[in-house]
Amino acid sequence: FPDRLEGLCHKNSMARKRASQYMMIKAAQRYPVTAELMKRCATGSTNLYKQHIMHALMECGVADSFYGEVYNELFSPESENNILVKPAFSPVKEVIDAIHDAGGIAILAHPMLSGGMEAVVKYAAVGINGIEVWHPSADEKTSAELLSYAKKNGLLATGGSACDAINLLKRHGCKQIKFMAIIGAPEGVSKVAEAHPDVDIYVSTLDRCLNENGYILPGLGDAGDRLFGTK
């Protein structure tokens, strides 16, 4: 794992941490919740996020659900009273170059949450190698548009890995397929079951739901973030 890439991950993690601390202060100024409680709700995480602030507010009785009026007030970009603080991340071109120097490929995850097609075109111009075409934030029509753009511009199309893996096995002649997962969400299980009703599905733990970013709640965090300590 090259030093430059590790250094960038650390730099961006610290930038996110500083932004989170400012959001925590803003939340404490507005509601009867302490910084200590919010930090306790983030125990086990390498950073403090929206969900940790919301969990603390729920414990204090300020909010009765994760999503709702309080969440929208604090974290919706459209809210005039939001407490969002944008982290001072490294320039995208610098990150992409570091990934390439390390022998990796740069994929734009959930593009519809990162500026949509405008962002795809922008980042393709500075060297991304692929885009996450299939993601909960993209409906069927949008996924088709992303896939078309990826094909026309020689980009990798990622996402929907469970269904794609099963499709690949079937193309190679596999008949009796069983899908096993450590943790899942109802939305994901339903998608696989609808696409492949002949496949037996085994999930050791079925969590509550997916959030707006397609992450399982409460979940274990993003796999890449866990591996490289970027969140």
Image (spheres, helix red, strand yellow):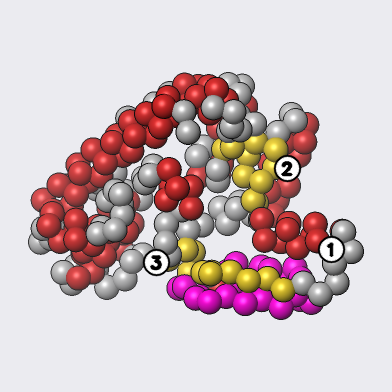
Number of residues whose C-alpha sits closer than 10 Å to that of mark 3, classed few (under 14), some (14–19) or many (20 or more): few
* Residue closer to the observer: 228 or 55: 228
Tell me if I can see residue 48 in this picture.
Answer: yes
Vertical comparison of 47 with 108: above or below: below
Number of residues whose C-alpha sits closer than 10 Å to that of mark 1, classed few (under 14), some (14–19) or many (20 or more): few
Location of mark 1 (residue): 170
Mark 1 or 2, closer to the camera: 1
* Residue closer to the observer: 157 or 102: 102
Location of mark 2 (residue): 147
Q: Which mark is residue 179?
A: none
Amino acid residing under circle 1:
Lys
Any magenta on residue 195? yes
Q: Mark 2 falls on what kind of element?
A: helix
- Tell whether 226 sits left or right of 75: right
Residue found at x 59% / y 37%: 107
Closer to the chain start, of discs 1 and 2, is 2
Residue found at x 50% / y 39%: 114
Amino acid residing under circle 3:
Pro
Location of mark 3 (residue): 218
Q: Mark 3 falls on what kind of element?
A: loop
Residue found at x 61% / y 33%: 105
Q: Mark 1 falls on what kind of element?
A: helix
